[in-house]
Structure formats: structure tokens, C-alpha cells
Image (cartoon, grey):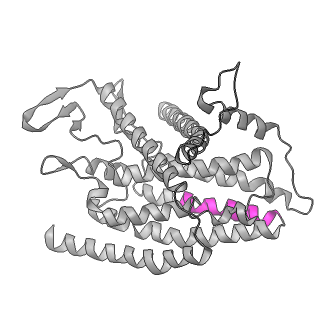
């Protein structure tokens, strides 16, 4: 029992260090990627002893600024809720990573350790639960600030996130039907097979429409452009406009953590998770009987690096969308969700059921 608890704590610390490290890096990526796309230099002024490192010191400068900046609470705000809101949003966005598998299993001293913090039979439902609870922190921030513009941002966030959570779930039903499980580890393991010996059985191959719907819904869920209506700076509307210092930094960190979470879920469900084509537990098994045996630790390392690479690629892709599309109007966001995407997700479920009945 003590050993299992120790391994669980180590896995939690490992996941948190990776996620928070990537979240800090995404602050630099967002600036530099937008600069490249817009033919600008981007942030590069922060330096240490004259070394600028292409702007990599800016996340450190941001952290120092946010930590040392005054923590201002409006005089007529609800101070308890105003303080609790950013903690609540960040906590639940981080908690969702507990069920994401980042490898198959690691064998140490005869003990097999699953490379996920918690291996739940209905892990994806836990992810949905945690992602849906983030909205409480956002809405709480808008209400506690006692500011009409902050309140409007909170209401926008609540209506948008609730609307797209319906599509978030319905777009994945086809995946659950195809793989016959809600357990994320089992879904990843079943994506290790091959069609015709060469094409991986990844979710994006089986559910291309489901992937497109989930991609759009998860961008709306994370409040990123073109669905950033809850924090529309150009409209002086935002659930966090009355926040400063590290509390504002926690909301900013929540956005980046949710982006990583979205990339992690897409990797797990649609891109094989930690799976690498032709890589099994003992090494690579290519067609025509060609085999390359590898040590167990190397196989586990390759699986983790594959998962990390897919997540980073999807983070880059989400940033690409963020700097490509303009913001939708509020009525356009609602119309897209309820009148277009929800019917398409139901059609996808119907087609998946027909294919499974008559062709499988």
C-alpha cells in the first residue's frame, strides 16, 4: 500500500511538472508563433546578461511580474469568491490529467506500474466532469467581481461551455462504439492494431467526422479564438477584467492547461495515444517478418516521447487556429453549436451504428 501510494505521488509530480512546464512554454509559443505568422519579430527584449535566447526568458519575466504585482480586489466584490475562483478553475483543469495514459506500463522489480495516475473504467467521464467544473470558476469570477462587464463575460462563458459540452460528448460516442470502452487505457491499446497490416487503427481513421466535431467543440470549451467571447478584450468584456497579479496569472495558466488537456484527449482518442505503428512491448515488428527487439525501458521511453510529440504538435495546431481565424459573434457561436454541429454529431452516431450492424 505504501509503495503504491509512493508511485502515485511520483506520477502526480511527474505529470504536473510536464504540464506546467509546457503551459509556461506556450506563453512564449503564442507570442513567437503569432509573430512568425504576421511577419514580426515578437517578444525578445527580456535578457539575462545580454542573452535573449529568442525570447525564452519572457515567461520568467512574466512570472516575476505576476508574483510581485499588487493583488487588487474591487471594494464591492465578494472577496472570498473573488479569491476562490482562479484556484477552482486551475485545480479542475489540472485534475483532468489524472486519467490520461502517457505509456503502457513500466516493470520495476517485478512490479507492473500503469503509466497513468488513475486507471478508471470510465476515465473519459472523469475528464468531462473536470472540464465542466472549470466553468464554475469562470462564472464565479464574473459574478464575484461586481462588475457588469465581468458578469457578462461569465454568462457568455457559462452558456458557451454548456452548449459545446453537449457536442463534446456526442461527438465521441462513435469512438466509444467503435472501441467498446470508456477506459482511456483500453481505447489506446485497441488503437495499436493495423488495417491491412500498414494503416493504424487510430480514432481519426475510424471517426474522421467525430474528430472534426470534437476539435471545434474542444476549442470552444477552452475559450480560445475564434470562441474567446468570454474574454473579449476588444469589447472590454471578460470574466477576469477585475483580476490582477497571480490571480490573473492563474486564469491565464488555466487557458494554457486546458489547451494541453485538449491536445492530450485528442491524442488519446484519435491519434493512438502512446502507440507507435509496428512498436510492440518487445520492439518493432515490421511487415515481411522484419523485427527489431528493444529493451523494455527504451520501449516505454519511446511510447512516452510519442505521446509528448503528438500533444505538442496538436498544441501548435491549436495555436495556428488561434492566430488564423477571427472571433465569431455570440449568435454565430450558438447557431454553429446547436443548429449545425449537434445534428452532425447525431448523424455520425447513426452512421456508426449502421456500419457496425451491417459491416462488422
- The image shows residue 313 at horizontal and vertical percentages of 43, 44
Residue furthest bottom in the image: 339
Magenta-tinted stretch: 129-145
Q: Is 144 part of what is drawn in magenta?
A: yes
- Which of these two is toward me, 106 or 286? 286
Name the dominant secondary structure of the magenta segment: helix
- The image shows residue 264 at horizontal and vertical percentages of 45, 48
Residue 94 can be seen in this image: no
Name the residue at 61% across, 42% down. 27
Q: Is 297 part of what is drawn in magenta?
A: no
Name the residue at 73% across, 66% down. 235
Location of residue 298 (image quadrant) = top left
- The image shows residue 159 at horizontal and vertical percentages of 62, 73
Q: Is residue 352 above or below residue 313?
A: below
Name the residue at 36% across, 23% down. 109
- The image shows residue 355 at horizontal and vertical percentages of 20, 71
Q: Is residue 166 above or below residue 76?
A: below
Amino acid at each position: 500500500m505504501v509503495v503504491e501510494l509512493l508511485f502515485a505521488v511520483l506520477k502526480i509530480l511527474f505529470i504536473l511538472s510536464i504540464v506546467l512546464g509546457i503551459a509556461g512554454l506556450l506563453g512564449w509559443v503564442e507570442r513567437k508563433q503569432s509573430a512568425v505568422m504576421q511577419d514580426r519579430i515578437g517578444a525578445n527584449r527580456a535578457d539575462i546578461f545580454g542573452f535573449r535566447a529568442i525570447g525564452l526568458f519572457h515567461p520568467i519575466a512574466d512570472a516575476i511580474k505576476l508574483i510581485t504585482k499588487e493583488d487588487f480586489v474591487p471594494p464591492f466584490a465578494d472577496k472570498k469568491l473573488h479569491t476562490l475562483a482562479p484556484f477552482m478553475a486551475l485545480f479542475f483543469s489540472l485534475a483532468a490529467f489524472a486519467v490520461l495514459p502517457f505509456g503502457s506500463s513500466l516493470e520495476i522489480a517485478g512490479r507492473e506500474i500503469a503509466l497513468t495516475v488513475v486507471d478508471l473504467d470510465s476515465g473519459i467521464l472523469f475528464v468531462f466532469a473536470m472540464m465542466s467544473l472549470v466553468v464554475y470558476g469562470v462564472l464565479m469570477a464574473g459574478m464575484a467581481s461586481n462588475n457588469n462587464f465581468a458578469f457578462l463575460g461569465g454568462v457568455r462563458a457559462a452558456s458557451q461551455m454548456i452548449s459545446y459540452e453537449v457536442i463534446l460528448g456526442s461527438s465521441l460516442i462513435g469512438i466509444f462504439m467503435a472501441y467498446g470502452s470508456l477506459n482511456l487505457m483500453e481505447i489506446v491499446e485497441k488503437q495499436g492494431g493495423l488495417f491491412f497490416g500498414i494503416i493504424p487503427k487510430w480514432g481519426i481513421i475510424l471517426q474522421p467526422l467525430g474528430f472534426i466535431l470534437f476539435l471545434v467543440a474542444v476549442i470552444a470549451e477552452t475559450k480560445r479564438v475564434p470562441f474567446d467571447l468570454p474574454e473579449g478584450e476588444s469589447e472590454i468584456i471578460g470574466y477576469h477584467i477585475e483580476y490582477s497579479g497571480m490571480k490573473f496569472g492563474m486564469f491565464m495558466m488555466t487557458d494554457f492547461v486546458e489547451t494541453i488537456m485538449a491536445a492530450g484527449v485528442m491524442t488519446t482518442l484519435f491519434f493512438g495515444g502512446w502507440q507507435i505503428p509496428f512498436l510492440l512491448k518487445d520492439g518493432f515488428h515490421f511487415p515481411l517478418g522484419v523485427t527489431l527487439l528493444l529493451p523494455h525501458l527504451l520501449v516505454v521511453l519511446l511510447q512516452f516521447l510519442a505521446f509528448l510529440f503528438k500533444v505538442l504538435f496538436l498544441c501548435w495546431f491549436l495555436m495556428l487556429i488561434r492566430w488564423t481565424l477571427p472571433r465569431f459573434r455570440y449568435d454565430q457561436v450558438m447557431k454553429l453549436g446547436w443548429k449545425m454541429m449537434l445534428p452532425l454529431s447525431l448523424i455520425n452516431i447513426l452512421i456508426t451504428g449502421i456500419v457496425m450492424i451491417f459491416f462488422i
